Image: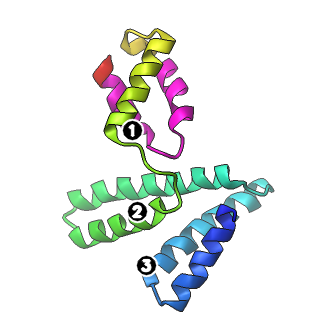
C-alpha cells in the first residue's frame, strides 16, 4: 500500500470513528500533497510525500516554540498531538545516539575539521537521515563536533 493510499484509508477510518484531530491532520497532509501535485503537474511518489510530511512536522515544531513563548499551552498541546499523528507516516525517528554516530562517521569520511566545512557535512549527512530527523537537530550535533 502506498503512502497516499494509507492516508486515504486512515482518513476514512478517522471519519468513521469521529476522530476530529486525526481527520484534520490527515486532511491537511492530503491537501498539501494535492497542492504540490497541481502546482508542479506531477504525481508524487512515497519519498516526495515523506518530504511533505516532514515539512509539516517541522512547521508544527516551530509553531510549538512560538505558542510556548506566547503562553498558549492549549495550542502547544494540540500541536504536539498533531505531530504524534504525523510521525505515524514517517520512518522510525533516529535517537540522539544514532544521529551522533552517523554525524561522527560522516565527519571522518568528509575529513572536516572546522566550521567552514559545515555545508559539506550537512550535504553528506542529510541524505542518510532523510525523513528520520530534522536539519535543525543535525546542525546542532555537527556544531558539537566542530
Residue labelled with disc 3 = 21
| Residue at x 52%, y 46% (from the top left corner) | 131
Residue 93 placement, left or right of 12 = left
Question: Residue 110: which numbered mark, if any?
Answer: none
Residue labelled with disc 2 = 83
Nearer-the-camera pick, 5 or 74: 5
Name the image quarter holding the N terminus: bottom right
Q: Which residues are magenta?
A: 119-143
The image shows residue 59 at horizontal and vertical percentages of: 44, 55
Reply above or below: 20 against 100: below
Q: CA distance from mark 1 to mark 2?
A: 16 Å
Q: Is residue 118 visible?
A: no
Give the secondary structure at mark 1. Answer: helix
Sequence-earlier tag: 1 or 2: 2
| Residue at x 31%, y 59% (from the top left corner) | 64
Name the image quarter holding the C terminus: top left
Residue labelled with disc 1 = 136
Q: Quadrant of residue 15?
A: bottom right
How many neighbours does mark 1 have within 10 angstroms: few (below 14), some (14-19), or many (20 or more)? few
Q: CA distance from mark 1 to mark 3?
A: 27 Å
Amino acid at each position: 500500500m502506498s503512502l497516499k493510499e494509507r492516508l486515504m484509508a486512515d482518513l476514512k477510518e478517522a471519519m468513521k470513528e469521529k476522530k476530529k484531530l486525526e481527520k484534520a491532520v490527515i486532511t491537511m497532509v492530503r491537501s498539501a500533497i494535492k497542492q504540490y501535485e497541481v502546482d508542479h503537474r506531477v504525481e508524487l511518489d512515497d519519498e516526495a510525500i515523506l518530504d511533505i510530511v516532514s515539512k509539516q512536522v517541522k512547521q508544527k515544531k516551530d509553531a510549538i516554540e512560538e505558542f510556548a513563548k506566547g503562553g498558549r499551552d492549549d495550542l502547544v498541546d494540540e500541536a504536539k498531538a498533531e505531530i504524534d499523528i504525523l510521525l505515524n507516516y514517517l520512518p522510525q525517528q533516529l535517537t540522539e545516539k544514532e544521529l551522533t554516530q552517523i554525524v561522527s562517521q560522516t565527519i571522518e569520511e568528509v575529513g572536516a575539521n572546522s566550521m567552514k566545512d559545515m555545508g559539506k557535512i550537512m550535504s553528506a549527512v542529510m541524505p542518510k537521515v532523510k525523513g528520520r530527523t530534522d536539519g535543525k537537530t543535525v546542525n546542532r550535533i555537527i556544531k558539537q563536533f566542530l
